[in-house]
Image (cartoon, rainbow, N blue to C red):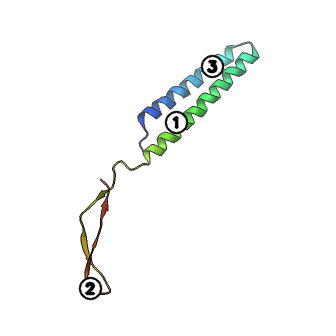
Amino acid sequence: MVQHPIDSQSAREKRDLACRARRLAQRLTVDADRMKLIQFAAELDKAADSLERRSAAISLLPTAAPRIGSHSTHPTPDRGVTRGEVVVEYE
């Protein structure tokens, strides 16, 4: 599965910022400031999760629109007569 490059990069950047925020939070002496940074890191991780899910969903979409092919004829078992069918192909 190929992920959308912009979303994947943005998710990595958010995870990196979350990691930095957690490291910085460990150095703070004021509990309120530490908790704010930890909460900010959690929000960044949540945003990264969302980007990764969106990227995965985009990669599941078909890469080409269906193309309507020419009519092909196939014998029908009941009458032995041919009929036309539309063939849908993906590139």
Q: Which residue is drawn at 50% across and 26% down?
A: 13
Residue position marked by numbered label 3 in the rendering:
23
Q: Is residue 49 above or below residue 30?
A: below
Picture residue at 30% right of the left edge, 81% below the top:
76
Q: Find residue 51 and name its label.
A: 1
Amino acid beneath label 3 = Arg
Which quadrant of the figure contains the N terminus? top left
Q: What residue type is labelled 1?
A: Leu
Residue 86 spot, x, y in % from top left: 30, 67
Task: Pinpoint residue 67: horizontal percent, then vertical percent.
Answer: 29, 56
Q: Residue at x 26, y 85 (%)?
A: 80
The image shows residue 42 at horizontal and vertical percentages of: 64, 29
Asked if 5 appears above or below 34 in the picture, the reply is: below
Whichever of callouts 3 and 1 sits on the residue coming sooner in the sequence is: 3
Say what secondary structure mark 2 lies in.
loop
Q: Name the residue under label 2.
A: 80
